[in-house]
Amino acid sequence: MLAGHNRGSSCLLLPLAMLILVATFFSSAAVASDVYLLRFDAVSRQSGCLNVVWHDQAMLLNSTNAPATVRVVGVSEGKPASGAADSFVIPAGSAVSLEDALGRPWLSIARLYVMHLDVPPGIRVASRNEVYINNGCISVQPPRPGALAQVSMPVFTALVPAGVPQVHLGTDLGERPSRTNVGIYNAGSVPAQARIELRRVCDNTVVDVRTVSIAPSATVQVGSLAAGPNLCQSTSQSEWLRYVVVSVDQPSLTFVSNVRETLPNENMGLIPTVDLAMPSSSVQQ
């Protein structure tokens, strides 16, 4: 049985120098009582005064003929400003953005965290990563500019039980070298121990392994796992393929990203830069 498996894939072409690929299990239109969203507001590549900002955005659609109330159950890190609402109503047949519905008290409460929502039947949820450019040399920052691009992000509908391996397929950027980063949310009430294995597909060799401890109700990212050489013990036409297996001894969620910084016009500009893509992944259960 596969829990929280993905229903599709998408890719994004941007004229940026940051290459990133996120491998995870996701649903672009999830319907469930429990919804877990990755939320983040992170600065990545910088050039002079300008910097690239990755920021999440979620949308919810009420497909029923009656108003529906969505409730915030909790977050893994941070807390909203005083007076923040912990629920909102979506009118019948209408869509809302999560940021508009919750308001400014919930904006950027932590750099990376998981938000748990209680979502009634008939509500469809989608999440995405939006890309912005900010000017760090301006002392008084204007309201966030419009997003330059977006790509689908995970919508989790259940926690993965303790000890169940979470498998993320396609955690590579082809034959280009990249850094593999693994995110883990410990939903347990005690510290969690996690084992991360980066494996080569052609011979299933473990090319890098990490163990990490995660505090209760916390989200961490373990960075820079090494993909190792594209050399297999058996003949393969795709020696660059990789996958990640994460085992956590507490209920959890995991996600994987691959990052590469390079010039935007490699190969004489014939191959466009792929900045963010969502390949197929699965969870064993």
Image (cartoon, rainbow, N blue to C red):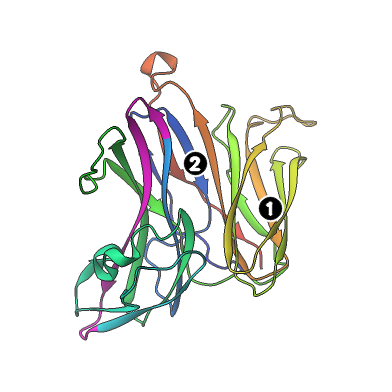
Q: Distance between the residues labelled 2 and 1?
A: 16 Å
- Provide residue 184's location: percent of width, then percent of height: 60, 57
Q: Does the magenta stretch include residue 61?
A: yes
Q: Which residue is drawn at 22% across and 84% down?
A: 67
Q: Judging from the image, what secondary structure is the residue with disc 1 in?
A: strand
Residue 142 appears at what percent x and percent y?
Answer: 20, 45
51 vs 195, left or right, is left
Q: What's the amino acid at mark 1?
A: Val
Please name the residue that numbered disc 2 is placed on.
Answer: 21
Tell me: residue 92, above or below residue 202.
below
- The relative height of residue 162 versus residue 152 in the rendered view (above or below) is below
Magenta range: 45-67
Please tell me the numbered disc located at residue 245: 1
Residue in the picture at 38% in, 68% down: 80
Is residue 13 visible in this depiction of the protein?
no
Q: Is residue 221 above or below residue 52?
A: below
- Judge left or right: residue 72 versus residue 90: right
Residue 147 seen in the current view: yes
Q: Nearer the viewer, residue 76 or 200?
A: 76
